[in-house]
Image (tube, grey):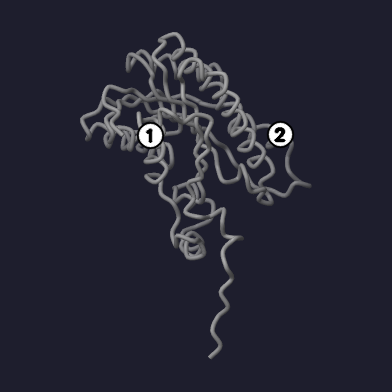
């Protein structure tokens, strides 16, 4: 999975899954343009970690949810790195709530940030890849929510399911340009956002209920992204990889009754 000579744009790379992808791509030899909404200690740390591998790293800050801002992000990434061979599209926004009470404006915002934002950045990067005529790799970060309709997540579920179908459509249209388009569906991943949403104690207790007895890590997702962006996956496109440690299989696992004393 050697990515020497390759360049990548990773959105939402200040922390969490985006950071895991950026760091693992750099570990494999790629130069990286990381995107986050604004410079921060998180982006500084990500840049430093990438540069520690001897790779070039630049920050292209901006709002990945808005088309005009995304245009600037992509343009500055191309200027800073000379080209974009790889895109990891990782924008997302999620707020839970019961369907009957869910705010329509919040529904629209979630679709915009989780689905439409992926369209904007992938279209702009794909145009660049087609113009260069050197192929390319696009990886969308989806979710296990794309296939499991969790209650109180109507907007996020819909956005991620739509993202999967959109990615397959894009893959079909870009085949003739030898641009590989694939999807990763993470399960429950140990990110700063999850600790804010659920708390450390709930995360620890929840991990024990998972088949792997732990949450996934951003590095777990980054390693799969690296594979999909490498020559090892040149014959894969339109594929969705579930990376969840068996999370989606919990209902299929045997029920073990406690032994009676």
Label 2 or label 1, whichever lies nearer to me, is 2
Q: Residue furthest bottom?
A: 261
Tag 2, which secondary structure? helix
> Most extreme residue toward the right, as rendered?
100
User: Residue 139 at what x, y percent from top left?
Assistant: 47, 31
At 43% across and 25% down in the image, what residue appears? 137
Q: Which residue is mark 1?
A: 40
Q: CA distance from mark 2 to mark 1?
A: 28 Å
Secondary structure under badge 1?
A: loop
| Residue 222, x across and y down, in percent | 39, 40
Q: What is the x, y in percent for residue 160?
A: 60, 38
Q: Image point 51% across, 45% down: which residue?
A: 242
Please state the horizontal and vertical placement of residue 29, each as a whole percent of the image.
Answer: 27, 30
- The answer to whether 204 is drawn above or below residue 85 in the figure is below
Residue at position x 49%, y 13% from top? 127
Q: Is residue 108 left or right of residue 199?
A: right
Q: Nearer the viewer, residue 184 or 189?
A: 184
- Which residue carries the number 2 mark? 105
Task: In this rendered view, identify the residue nearer to me: 212 or 82.
Answer: 212
- In the rendered structure, the answer to whether residue 144 lies left or right of residue 201 reads right
Q: Which mark is residue 70?
A: none
Check whether the beta carbons of the residues at disc 2 and disc 1 lie within 8 A of each other: no
Q: In the depicted view, which residue is nearer to us: 207 or 232?
A: 232
Q: Give the residue at the far top of this rendering.
A: 131
The image quarter containing residue 84 is: top left
10 Å neighbourhood of mark 1: few (<14), some, or many (≥20)?
A: few
């Amino acid at each position: 999975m050697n990515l020497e000579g390759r360049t990548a744009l990773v959105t939402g790379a200040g922390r969490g899954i985006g950071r895991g992808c950026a760091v693992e791509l750099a570990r494999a030899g790629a130069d990286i343009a990381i995107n986050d909404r604004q410079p921060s200690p998180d982006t500084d740390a990500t840049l430093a970690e990438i540069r520690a591998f001897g790779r070039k790293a630049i920050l292209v800050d901006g709002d990945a949810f808005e088309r005009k801002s995304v245009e600037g992000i992509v343009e500055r990434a191309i200027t800073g790195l000379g080209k974009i061979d790889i895109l990891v599209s990782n924008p997302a926004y999620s707020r839970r709530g019961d369907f009957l009470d869910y705010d329509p404006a919040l529904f629209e915002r979630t679709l915009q940030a989780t689905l439409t934002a992926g369209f904007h950045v992938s279209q702009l990067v794909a145009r660049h890849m087609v113009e260069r005529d050197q192929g390319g790799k696009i990886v969308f970060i989806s979710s296990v929510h794309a296939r499991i309709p969790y209650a109180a997540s109507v907007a996020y579920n819909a956005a991620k399911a739509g993202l999967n179908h959109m990615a397959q459509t894009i893959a079909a249209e870009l085949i003739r340009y030898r641009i590989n388009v694939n999807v990763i569906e993470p399960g429950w991943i140990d990110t700063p956002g999850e600790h804010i949403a659920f708390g450390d104690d709930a995360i620890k207790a929840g991990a024990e209920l998972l088949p792997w007895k732990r949450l996934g890590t951003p590095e777990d997702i980054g390693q799969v992204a690296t594979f999909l962006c490498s020559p090892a996956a040149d014959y894969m496109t339109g594929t969705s990889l579930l990376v969840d440690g068996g999370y989606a299989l919990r209902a299929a696992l045997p029920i073990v009754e406690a032994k009676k004393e």
